[in-house]
């Protein structure tokens, strides 16, 4: 908006002017969050706003503690150097990922930077109330002694179907949860606002924003963890959530008609046939050592382990074929133990994962491992908080 535009605004239009300012704040903070450190000249170019407006917006964000400004040279071409604007670590989100064997808690700064990570081991699946108790203890321990960090809220990555509107866990079959208001329970226990969503969808959000799927408009994402297999898809640059947020249940793709009974009640689902527990056991690893699975699968020469790899890869191949044939992506991203299985199988001479995909759909499709590793679900959970924060920074911080 130019000065001449402002001159035509009547006093009663103050609300519209304020809405425009909030929108511009969100635009600037979103750019710094997604793209990292940017010079003020970069922000002027990317937003299309004038320099003084960008300067005022940056100053307001700095006053809120959301960005830091480095007055050192940062990309200005001629004349005075352009200050560099970067996201501050002073405002962070708490991320929680309950699994059947642990509750993982992280502290995540803007820009997807995981500052801290705590893993609380558990013997087995547990009730939602017990999960909230463990998560709350993990959060308290993680924040003990922390000074200078303001918590904007809590994001929860749940291995189950979660209603996006209110964070209600409609079904988490590995835990036996049905209609558990997990977000509300965690908010009440900690005093922080909380949001929850399906873990795999959040992993997809993280990889799309900061990882292997960055800048890709059409992709399929599949991830495997201790609590099963999930995923999601992006089409035309938009996350495909379905009517209520339950889309992307690749773990329940049928891969074997005479297969094992699945926790969902059906038979032959991918997550019933291919499990992290069996892959870990095949190479002598415990669940806490899952990060070493890919290397161990690549290196193994044990005949029994190789048989497990071959069988599981075949099941993954069927699921990947279905996903690519249906969604026609340009990229298939594999995360968690599925990435480890893919790497291990290919190291032992397995054929192309997409060998059986319709030829025209297969052309140009790249298969890649998730770039964010074990942090992808924490970063994705934090995005639930940051999306609210970025949309209206001042209001979100006031409510935190």
Image (cartoon, rainbow, N blue to C red):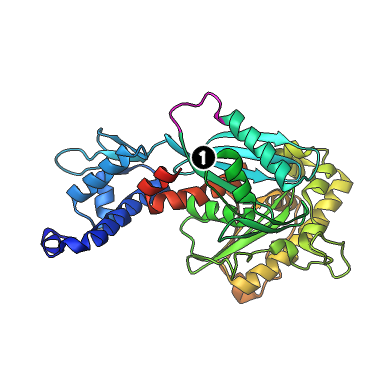
Q: Is residue 145 magenta?
A: yes
The residue drawn where x is 22% and y is 43% is 76
Q: Quadrant of the N terminus?
A: bottom left
Q: Main secondary structure of the magenta part?
A: loop
Q: In terms of depth relative to the viewer, which is nearer, 267 or 353?
A: 267
Tell me: 101 left or right of 308. left
Tell me: 168 left or right of 54. right
Residue 294 visible: no
Q: Is residue 80 magenta?
A: no
Q: In terms of depth relative to the viewer, which is nearer, 335 or 169?
A: 169
Residue 366 vs 325, above or below: the answer is above
Where's residue 19, x and y in %?
29, 58
How dense is the environment of label 1, judged by Cα within 10 Å: few (below 14), some, or many (20 and up)?
many
Q: Secondary structure at mark 1?
A: strand
Tell me: 183 left or right of 121. left
Q: Report which quarter residue 368 is drawn in.
A: bottom right
Q: Report which quarter residue 143 is drawn in.
A: top right
The residue drawn where x is 86% and y is 52% is 307
Residue 74 visible: yes
Where's residue 160, x and y in %?
69, 56
Magenta-tinted stretch = 143-149
In the picture of the structure, the residue carrying the numbered disc 1 is: 108
């Amino acid at each position: 908006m130019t000065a001449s535009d402002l001159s035509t605004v009547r006093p009663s239009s103050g609300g519209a002017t304020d809405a425009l300012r909030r929108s511009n704040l969100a635009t600037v903070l979103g750019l710094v969050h997604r793209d990292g450190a940017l010079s003020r000249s970069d922000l002027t170019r990317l937003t299309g706003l004038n320099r003084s407006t960008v300067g005022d917006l940056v100053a307001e964000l700095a006053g809120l503690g959301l960005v830091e400004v480095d007055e050192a040279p940062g990309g200005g071409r001629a004349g005075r150097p352009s200050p560099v604007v970067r996201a501050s670590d002073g405002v962070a989100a708490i991320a929680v990922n309950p699994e059947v064997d642990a509750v993982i808690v992280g502290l995540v700064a803007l820009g997807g930077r995981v500052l801290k990570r705590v893993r609380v081991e558990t013997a087995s699946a547990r009730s939602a109330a017990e999960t909230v108790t463990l998560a709350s203890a993990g959060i308290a321990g993680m924040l003990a002694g922390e000074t200078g960090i303001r918590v904007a809220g809590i994001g929860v990555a749940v291995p189950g179907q979660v209603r996006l509107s209110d964070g209600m866990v409609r079904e988490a079959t590995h835990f036996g949860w049905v209609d558990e208001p997990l977000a509300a329970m965690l908010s009440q226990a900690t005093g922080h606002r909380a949001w929850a969503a399906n873990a795999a969808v959040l992993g997809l959000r993280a990889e799309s924003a900061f990882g292997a799927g960055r800048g890709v408009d059409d992709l399929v994402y599949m991830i495997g963890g201790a609590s099963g297999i999930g995923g999601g898809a992006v089409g035309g640059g938009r996350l495909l959530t379905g009517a209520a947020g339950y889309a992307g249940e690749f773990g329940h793709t049928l891969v074997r008609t005479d297969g094992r009974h699945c926790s969902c009640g059906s038979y032959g689902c991918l997550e019933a046939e291919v499990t992290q527990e069996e892959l870990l056991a095949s190479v002598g690893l415990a669940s806490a050592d899952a990060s070493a699975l890919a290397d161990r699968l690549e290196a193994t020469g044990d005949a029994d382990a190789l048989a497990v790899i071959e069988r599981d890869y075949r099941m993954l191949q069927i699921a990947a074929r279905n996903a690519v044939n249906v969604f026609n992506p340009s990229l298939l991203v594999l995360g968690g133990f599925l990435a480890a299985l893919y790497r291990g199988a290919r190291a032992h001479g397995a054929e192309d994962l997409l060998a059986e995909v319709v030829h025209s759909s297969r052309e140009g499709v790249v298969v890649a491992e998730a770039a964010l590793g074990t942090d992808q679900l924490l970063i994705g959970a934090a995005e639930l908080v940051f999306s609210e924060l970025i949309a209206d920074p001042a209001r979100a911080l006031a409510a935190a």
